[in-house]
Amino acid sequence: MRYRCDTSKTQPDGAILWYAQWWVGGPTLAKIENCRLPNLAGDMRRTVVIRNVADTFFSVPAECSIGGCDVRGYVTDDGSGNLVFQQVYY
């Protein structure tokens, strides 16, 4: 885990967003439990850990584990108000 997890909030799709409470700047997204991975077959869900601060307005660098391998990508909005994980293909 990169950041501590102090408070949580549940999304409409059932994913749990965990935030770190910083004394300056307000809450920062730390991890998402039961996060949806929309570009994989089926309704795949994993725990996604935030790797760094946001690099753009629309995405936050993140990683999760699939089959024992660390998969890097980013967390972004799916258009209906839910945060989802999109993996990066090289």
Image (spheres, rainbow, N blue to C red):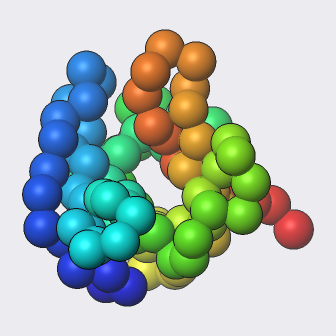
Farthest residue, direction bottom: 2
**Left or right side of 7 for 90:** right
Q: Can you give x and y, in whole percent of width and height, for residue 30 in the image?
A: 34, 67
Farthest residue, direction left: 7
Quadrant the C terminus occupies = bottom right
- Residue at the location (55% across, 50% down)? 75
Farthest residue, direction right: 90
Quadrant hosting residue 38? top right
- Residue 48's place in the image compared with 82, above or below, is below
- Residue at the location (49% across, 14% down)? 80
Q: Can you give x and y, in whole percent of width and height, for residue 49 in the image?
A: 40, 69
Q: Can you give x and y, in whole percent of width and height, for residue 70 in the image?
A: 53, 79
- Residue at the location (56% across, 26% down)? 78
Q: Is residue 63 at all visible to an observer of this figure?
A: no
**Left or right side of 37 for 27:** left
**Left or right side of 5 for 67:** right
Quadrant the N terminus occupies = bottom left
- Residue 12's place in the image compared with 34, above or below, is above
- Residue 51's place in the image compared with 6, above or below, is below
- Residue at the location (26% across, 48% down)? 17
Quadrant hosting residue 44? top left
Say which of 23 and 63 sits in front: 23
Q: Is residue 52 at all visible to an observer of this figure?
A: yes
Farthest residue, direction top: 80
Q: Can you give x and y, in whole percent of width and height, for residue 11 in the image?
A: 26, 30
- Count every numbered label the image shows and give the total: 0
